[in-house]
């Protein structure tokens, strides 16, 4: 008999807004925008939220959705800015973006449904928004089923937070022990993982090793792709048998350890290249989770920056937070926190503005997720200094205010375009 049970209807995207910053403070206020309806936003209200932003006009802008956002500036006193570019009249067919009005920042989201029932939580120096919370919920469920966990994610994105969540969900009596496998010599890696006995080699002493330290608990191995092949073989044996042998010792000891392993590299590609054991990957990849990069968790950015200034005299300016929201941050949370503290040091107890942020912060060319250089087909002789204000304005207009697209049109890196916008007074940084 055919299954006649009704299939669940496909969930439709719900366009909307997320107010995330106003007057120096991180916020979290989701607003659903009904298709076809027009919402007027201003100083006294953004979807029911009174921001009391004196830099905003009473009727500042109109927002609507019809297969994309339409943003119309209502001749506001200080302007409406989309992704850092002033809205001249209106822009249409915008899929998503960062909207600045006065001292207030709003995310335009083609689907706000995941944010309507959540919040951004901060505790013990950790910030978790709805995007990351969904990942951590899957981690907890995976641990409830037992087995090891493989975590994929960029450097600084929060893989250790996943390991801590896994450990808490396990409710094991043993501790969480962490080890970074990157840039460590094979012999030293083996000694750290499995321990040593005195006299095994020069200067060797009796050590327990990380497996024995984590007995009854969880061992988190970050950047596991960096392990030498010989150490991988010994790790495979420990995973398969639950037994470890210290370097220089004939005795074998049994351990009960759950593993969380992480890498920013694709282990399947490392296997194809002969750099990682296929059988070890099979053993470790019982459950897999992907940690989203910070640029996919923008709701956390103002809260993280606020956390970076905790206990300091400095306060956040809207221009700094806007700039942070528009940069890719290849170093993710770790890089954002460091850059915010460095910017605060330049502010010296005052308001931290975008002018205090290093030009390279969040845009490092040597990081794998930095923006690519201009296409090779563009003339190499074209230099930023040769471009006029009119040319830059036209490129931004043709790109609907998208700075990345405008930079590609001009044959520039986004950082070069950012400097030109500052030079020509097109940044729209508020007072």
Image (cartoon, rainbow, N blue to C red):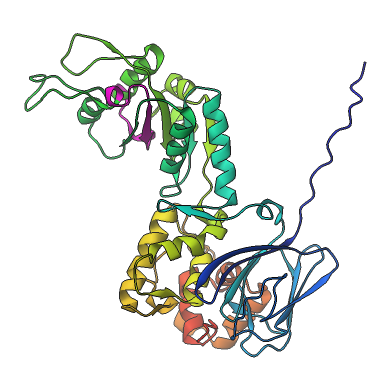
67 displayed left or right of 19: right
| Whole-percent x, y for residue 382 in the image | 48, 76
Of residue 143 and residue 242, the one placed in the foreground of this image is 143
Q: Is residue 218 magenta?
A: yes
387 displayed left or right of 19: left
Q: Is residue 18 magenta?
A: no
Residue 325 visible? The answer is yes
Whether 336 is drawn above or below 189: the answer is below
Q: Which residue is found at the position 82% from the left and 65% from the top?
A: 66
| Whole-percent x, y for residue 359 in the image | 39, 71
Residue 383 visible? The answer is no
| Whole-percent x, y for residue 390 in the image | 59, 87
Q: Which residue is found at the position 25% from the left and 36% from the top?
A: 184
Of residue 386 and residue 184, the one placed in the foreground of this image is 184
Of residue 197 and residue 371, the one placed in the foreground of this image is 197
Q: Which residue is found at the position 21% from the left and 23% from the top?
A: 208
Which corner quadrant of the image does residue 86 belong to?
bottom right
33 displayed left or right of 147: right
Quadrant assignment for the N terminus: top right
Which corner quadrant of the image does residue 140 belong to?
top right
Q: Which residues are magenta?
A: 211-230
The image shows a total of numbered marks equal to 0
| Whole-percent x, y for residue 400 in the image | 68, 73
Whether 354 is drawn above or below 222: the answer is below
Q: Which residue is found at the position 28% from the left and 22% from the top?
A: 212
């Amino acid at each position: 008999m055919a299954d006649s049970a009704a299939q669940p209807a496909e969930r439709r995207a719900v366009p909307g807004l997320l107010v995330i910053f106003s007057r120096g403070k991180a916020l979290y206020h989701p607003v659903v925008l009904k298709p076809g309806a027009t919402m007027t936003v201003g100083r006294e209200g953004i979807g029911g939220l009174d921001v009391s932003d004196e830099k905003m006009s009473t009727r500042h802008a109109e927002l609507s959705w019809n297969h994309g956002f339409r943003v119309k500036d209502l001749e506001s006193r200080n302007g409406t800015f989309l992704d850092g570019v002033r809205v001249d009249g209106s822009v249409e067919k915008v899929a998503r973006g960062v909207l600045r009005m006065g001292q207030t920042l709003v995310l335009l989201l083609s689907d706000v449904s995941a944010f309507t029932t959540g919040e951004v939580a901060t505790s013990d120096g950790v910030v978790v928004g709805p995007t990351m919370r969904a990942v951590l919920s899957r981690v907890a469920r995976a641990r409830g089923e037992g087995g090891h966990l493989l975590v994929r994610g960029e450097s600084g994105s929060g893989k250790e937070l996943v390991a801590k969540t896994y450990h808490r969900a396990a409710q094991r009596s043993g501790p969480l022990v962490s080890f970074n496998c990157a840039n460590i010599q094979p012999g030293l890696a083996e000694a750290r993982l499995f321990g040593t006995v005195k006299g095994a080699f020069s200067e060797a002493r009796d050590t327990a090793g990380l497996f024995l330290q984590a007995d009854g608990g969880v061992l988190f191995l970050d950047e596991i792709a960096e392990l030498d092949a010989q150490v991988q073989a010994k790790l495979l044996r420990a995973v398969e048998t639950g037994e470890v042998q210290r370097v220089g010792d004939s005795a074998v000891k049994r351990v009960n350890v759950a593993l969380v392993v992480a890498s920013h590299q694709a282990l399947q590609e490392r296997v194809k290249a002969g750099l990682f054991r296929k059988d070890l990957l099979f053993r470790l990849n019982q459950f897999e989770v992907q940690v989203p990069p910070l640029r996919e968790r923008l709701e956390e950015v103002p809260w993280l920056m606020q956390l970076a200034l905790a206990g300091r005299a400095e306060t956040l300016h809207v221009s700094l937070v806007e700039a942070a929201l528009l940069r890719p941050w290849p170093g993710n949370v770790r890089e954002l926190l460091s850059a915010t503290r460095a910017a605060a040091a330049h502010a010296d107890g005052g308001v931290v503005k975008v002018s205090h942020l290093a030009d390279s912060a969040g845009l490092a060319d040597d990081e794998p997720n930095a923006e690519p250089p201009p296409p090779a087909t563009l003339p190499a002789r074209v230099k930023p200094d040769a471009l006029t204000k009119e040319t830059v304005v036209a490129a931004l207009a043709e790109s609907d205010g998208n700075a990345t697209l405008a930079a590609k049109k001009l044959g520039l890196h986004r950082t070069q375009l950012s400097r030109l916008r500052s030079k020509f007074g097109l940044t729209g940084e508020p007072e």
